[in-house]
Image (cartoon, rainbow, N blue to C red):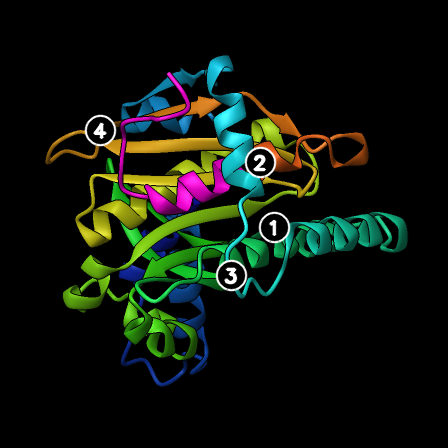
């Protein structure tokens, strides 16, 4: 891919842009192709190139009860109770085709909507921003860009309209007042192979942190049935960093792990910029 990019760049340099015989659409098309080629595809090898260390994140068994209690907590005026969430998840499982990733998005929507419901209060609101674009960012000499399937934010209520109506402008890196006040998590939806899909999500987190001058970002890769939690931590002024990655948690038969997953999701949103862990080691 890099050889093709270099060859294209050399070819473009040798073109006479004032040549009237050049098709008018050629140069814009070449520029678009060059931008696509310059963006590096992401797999586990990218961690070595970016000097990102990978460490395990181990769930503390003695904290399970506390996490589940958090996941089952209700608030007054809750729009989506735990019982209603259970019923809707059962309905999705029983009625939605599983031939593609659409079912994953529907399942994830239910989890995130429940979060928005139980974490809603006078001081903060949880907002869900689907398909949020990450600006092209250079890390370790490589360019990255992409789309976050779900950006979940927690902010004071006065920011809600901005986040829901103009999220890209609201969270632009130069809009520091908003960006500094909003806590963000990234959620990547994967229909299968959730365990091996984390490199893309980690690079997205690293890109977002660099653009917004953040040190820490939490995230999750999920199919709606399988969930993998991670935390990215940037190391100083360089592009180096580390990511701690938890073992996959499966929702399971009869939604067995629903309280655990909801509790961890509440903690992830509430402590989006904290590297220190309450429920993991």
Of marks 1 and 3, which one's residue comes earlier in the chain? 3
Callout 4: SS: loop
Q: CA distance from mark 4 to mark 2?
A: 30 Å
Q: Is residue 192 magenta?
A: no
Q: Residue at x 38, y 58 (%)?
A: 153
Of marks 2 and 1, which one's residue comes earlier in the chain? 1
Specify the farthest residue to the left. Answer: 237
Q: Quadrant of residue 230?
A: top left
Say which residue label 4 marks: 240
Say which residue label 1 marks: 111
Point out which mark residue 76 bears.
Answer: 3
Of marks 1 and 4, which one's residue comes earlier in the chain? 1
Q: Is residue 98 above or below residue 116?
A: above
Place of residue 272 in the rendered image (x, y in percent of width and height, measured from the top left) = 33, 43
Place of residue 278 in the rendered image (x, y in percent of width and height, measured from the top left) = 35, 26
Density class for disc 1 (Cα within 10 Å; few <14, some 14-19, many ≥20) is: some
Of marks 2 and 3, which one's residue comes earlier in the chain? 3
The foreground one among 195 and 91 is: 91
Callout 2: SS: helix
Q: CA distance from mark 1 to mark 3?
A: 19 Å
Of marks 4 and 2, which one's residue comes earlier in the chain? 4
Density class for disc 2 (Cα within 10 Å; few <14, some 14-19, many ≥20) is: many
Magenta range is 263-281
Q: Residue at x 39, y 29 (%)?
A: 46
Callout 1: SS: helix
Say which residue label 2 marks: 261
């Amino acid at each position: 891919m890099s050889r093709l990019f270099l060859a294209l760049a050399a070819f473009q340099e040798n073109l006479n842009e004032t040549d009237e015989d050049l098709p008018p659409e050629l140069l814009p098309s070449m520029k678009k192709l060059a931008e696509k080629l310059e963006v590096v595809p992401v797999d586990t090898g990218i961690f070595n190139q970016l000097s990102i260390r990978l460490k395990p994140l181990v769930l503390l068994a003695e904290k399970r009860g506390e996490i589940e209690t958090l996941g089952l907590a209700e608030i007054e005026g809750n729009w989506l109770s735990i019982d209603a969430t259970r019923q809707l998840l059962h309905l999705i499982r029983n009625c939605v085709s599983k031939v593609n990733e659409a079912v994953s998005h529907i399942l994830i929507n239910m989890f995130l909507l429940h979060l928005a419901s139980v974490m809603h209060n006078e001081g903060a609101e949880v907002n869900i921003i689907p398909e949020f674009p990450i600006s092209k960012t250079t890390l370790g000499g490589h360019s990255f860009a992409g789309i976050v399937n779900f950006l979940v934010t927690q902010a004071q209520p006065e920011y809600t309209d901005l986040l829901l109506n103009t999220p890209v402008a609201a969270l632009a890196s130069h809009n520091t007042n908003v960006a500094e006040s909003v806590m963000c998590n990234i959620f990547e939806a994967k229909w299968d192979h959730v365990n091996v899909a984390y490199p893309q999500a980690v690079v997205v987190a690293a890109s977002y942190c660099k653009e917004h001058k953040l040190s820490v970002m939490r995230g999750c890769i999920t199919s709606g049935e399988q969930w993998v939690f991670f935390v990215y931590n940037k190391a100083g002024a360089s592009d180096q960093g580390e990511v701690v990655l938890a073992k996959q948690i499966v929702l399971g038969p009869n939604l067995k792990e629903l309280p655990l997953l909801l509790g961890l999701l509440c903690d992830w949103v509430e402590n989006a910029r904290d590297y220190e862990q309450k429920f993991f080691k």
